[in-house]
Image: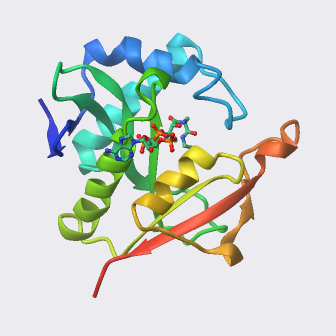
Amino acid sequence: MGLILETPRLILRNWRDDDRDLFREINRDPKVMEFFPFRRSAEEADGLMQRARAMIEETGLGLYALELKQDAEPIGFCGLSKAGLFPVLPKETMEIGWRLATRFWGNGYITEAAGALVQFGFKAKGLSEIVAFAVEANRRSTAVMERIGMHRDADGDFDHPRVPDSHPHLKRHVLYRISRPD
Ligand SMILES: CC(C)(COP(=O)(O)OP(=O)(O)OC[C@H]1O[C@@H](n2cnc3c(N)ncnc32)[C@H](O)[C@@H]1OP(=O)(O)O)[C@@H](O)C(=O)NCCC(=O)NCCS
């Protein structure tokens, strides 16, 4: 089933066809997408899920599906991927990111998944540093960064190059980093 990792309450795995409804849900919900300048149609969400699945198959890294162990329900994603923000960040910079269906917020699931993924990135994938970034007002996301031990790099704040001028309030991003312990 494409298992990547297990935590006490969660399975991180590759995507399956029957995750499609959940993936569509997290790409259209205005609350989940509050800090993104776009919404995805069902077709666009399906395409993104296929690309995430192929990337995990090919590289072992990407946006992994999160599944609740208690009832095998998919709830969102958490993953490691290239930030793709050169020249804002160096080409090889690895990013951790997450998105959870709103009905599962407030249970610590992302903190649990992301904390385990950071260790996985350092130990199993040999990464030396992982970054995360978000619109400053996205406190739920920056709170996860802080809970998993990431540190704000205030000198690294940047205007996201792919946020259009039509959404100026979503341009400024704060940067957090965590390094592999020596
Ligand atoms: C960012 C996001 C994933 C955070 O979700 P979340 O549920 O707040 O985060 P966690 O799963 O870590 O849960 C933390 C919350 O659960 C509570 N909690 C309950 N049990 C917990 C536990 N065992 N461990 C940690 N926290 C726990 C915490 O107190 C916290 O609640 P609070 O918000 O009232 O302080 C979610 O808001 C989201 O999907 N946002 C939209 C997408 C997005 O913006 N992604 C990031 C783009 S940069």
Q: Nearer the viewer, residue 10 or 14?
A: 10
- Please tell me in which quadrant of the rendered image residue 101 appears: top left
Q: How many marks?
A: 0
Q: Is residue 46 visible?
A: no
Q: Nearer the viewer, residue 129 or 151?
A: 151
Is the residue 47 above or below the residue 61 in the image? above
Q: Residue visible at 11% across and 29% down?
A: 1
Is the residue 114 above or below the residue 94 in the image? above
Q: Residue visible at 47% across and 36% down?
A: 99
Is the residue 86 above or below the residue 113 in the image? below
Q: Is residue 16 visible?
A: yes
Is the residue 21 above or below the residue 1 in the image? above
In the image, is 30 to the left or to the right of 57? right
Spot occupied by residue 12 in the image (x, y as percentages of width and height): 23, 39
> Outermost residue, front direction?
106
Spot occupied by residue 63 in the image (x, y as percentages of width and height): 37, 41
- Please tell me in which quadrant of the rendered image residue 39 appears: top right
Spot occupied by residue 113 in the image (x, y as percentages of width and height): 30, 47
Q: Residue visible at 49% across and 24% down?
A: 102
